[in-house]
């Protein structure tokens, strides 16, 4: 853990970074949802054909996880703003942002090219993003519990 003065001064900046990232990310993933609805509505075969069920699932997972993690980044930033004597660690801010990039990107990339019903190699980004998410949420929970 860094020295208190350095940690304290970085906290508001990190919270702002997560807030900005969260709101822009929310816009992107809500837009992706609208695109997916359009593909579904116009019955675009590349998306809706029976053989593309894996693609549809992976893109839906990318949209859902991206939207949820955008909200988690916003919540983290607002938690820092709301609670006294609580700051976001630099590593937690980094992990939350990268989790919100890697998890949905892994699902999306895994759905672009599918192999006999299996997702593409991009899906290997998902466990990395999940590990970063687990670390950041656990660290926030511990830091909130230890707050005096």
Image (cartoon, grey):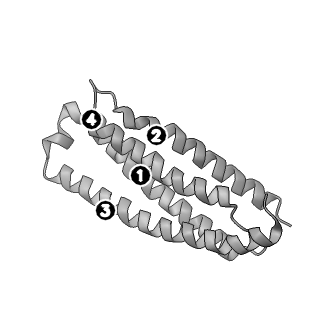
Secondary element under disc 4, as helix, strand or loop, is loop
Q: Earlier in the sequence, mark 1 or mark 2?
A: 1
Secondary element under disc 1, as helix, strand or loop, is helix
Secondary element under disc 3, as helix, strand or loop, is helix
Q: Is residue 86 shown to the viewer in this render?
A: no
Position of 124 relative to 25 (above/below): above
Q: Are marks 2 and 3 in contact (CB under 8 Å)?
A: no
Q: Earlier in the sequence, mark 3 or mark 4?
A: 3
In this figure, which residue is indicated by the disc labeled 3?
A: 31
Q: Give the number of callouts.
A: 4
In this figure, which residue is indicated by the disc labeled 1?
A: 64
Toward the viewer: 23 or 50?
A: 23
Q: Nearer the viewer, mark 1 or mark 2?
A: 2
Mark 3 Cα-neighbour bin, 10 Å: few <14, some 14–19, many ≥20: some
In this figure, which residue is indicated by the disc labeled 4?
A: 113
Q: Are marks 1 and 3 in contact (CB under 8 Å)?
A: no
Residue sitting at x 64%, y 52%: 136
Residue 123 locus on image (x, y percent): 41, 36
Mark 2 Cα-neighbour bin, 10 Å: few <14, some 14–19, many ≥20: some
Residue 117 locus on image (x, y percent): 29, 27
Residue sitting at x 49%, y 65%: 22
Q: CA distance from mark 1 to mark 3?
A: 12 Å
Q: Earlier in the sequence, mark 1 or mark 3?
A: 3
Mark 1 Cα-neighbour bin, 10 Å: few <14, some 14–19, many ≥20: some
Q: Earlier in the sequence, mark 1 or mark 4?
A: 1
Q: Nearer the viewer, mark 1 or mark 4?
A: 4
Q: Are marks 2 and 4 in contact (CB under 8 Å)?
A: no
Q: CA distance from mark 1 to mark 4?
A: 20 Å
Q: Earlier in the sequence, mark 2 or mark 4?
A: 4
Q: Name the side, left or right, on which 106 lies relative to 139.
A: left
């Amino acid at each position: 853990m860094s020295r208190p003065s350095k940690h304290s001064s970085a906290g508001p900046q990190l919270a702002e970074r997560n807030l900005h990232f969260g709101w822009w990310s929310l816009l992107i993933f809500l837009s992706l949802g609208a695109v997916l609805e359009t593909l579904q509505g116009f019955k675009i075969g590349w998306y809706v054909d029976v053989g593309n069920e894996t693609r549809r699932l992976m893109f839906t997972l990318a949209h859902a996880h991206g939207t949820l993690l955008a909200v988690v980044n916003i919540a983290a930033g607002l938690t820092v703003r709301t609670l006294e004597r609580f700051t976001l660690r630099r590593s937690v801010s980094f992990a939350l942002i990268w989790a919100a990039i890697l998890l949905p990107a892994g699902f999306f990339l895994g759905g672009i090219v599918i192999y006999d019903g299996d997702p593409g190699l991009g899906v290997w980004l998902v466990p990395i993003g999940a590990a970063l998410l687990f670390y950041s949420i656990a660290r926030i929970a511990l830091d909130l519990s230890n707050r005096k």
